[in-house]
Image (cartoon, rainbow, N blue to C red):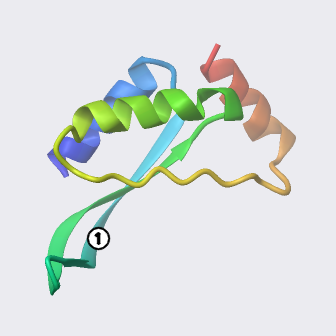
Amino acid sequence: MEEAKGIAQTLIREKAAGWVNISPVNSMYREGGEIKEREGASLIVKTIESKVQDVEDIVRAAHKNRIHCVASFTLYRLNREYKDWLIGSLA
């Protein structure tokens, strides 16, 4: 969790994200023909489209020796007050 908090702080400090939610997760994956399990953290990073590459670059720099997943979703709708706040926080 400390690593996730550090990444979140960097994302916000560098204005790549306006808000980051951090949740503990248990992950299962296949590696070398075996199913493995690991505890970790999942981050929901709230940003704008023009900052997605910055988010990916920061996460990649923090995970130099690991595979990471940065997935971007287009929102159908976002309330105006939050959208205005988010854009302002990234300026």
Residue found at the far top of this picture:
91
Left of 46 or right of it: where is 62? Answer: left
How many labels sit on residues?
1
Report the front residue among 9 and 59: 59
- Mark 1, residue position: 25
Up-down relation of residue 91 to residue 57 (above or below): above
Quarter of the C terminus within the rendering = top right
Instruction: Identify the secondary structure beneath mark 1.
Output: strand
Up-down relation of residue 89 to residue 81 (above or below): above
Left of 54 or right of it: where is 58? Answer: left
Amino acid beneath label 1: Val
Q: Is residue 17 visible?
A: no
Up-down relation of residue 62 to residue 71 (above or below): above
| Mark 1 crowdedness (10 Å alpha carbons): few <14, some 14-19, many ≥20 | few
Left of 86 or right of it: where is 24? Answer: left
User: Where's residue 63, x and y in %?
Assistant: 23, 41
Left of 5 or right of it: where is 47? Answer: right
Residue displayed at 28% across by 53% down: 67
Q: Is residue 7 visible?
A: yes
User: Where's residue 66, x and y in %?
Assistant: 21, 50
**Quadrant of residue 90 within the rendered picture:** top right
Report the front residue among 27 and 82: 27
Residue displayed at 26% across by 78% down: 29
Report the front residue among 19 and 64: 64
Residue displayed at 24% across by 35% down: 62
Residue displayed at 26% across by 41% down: 5
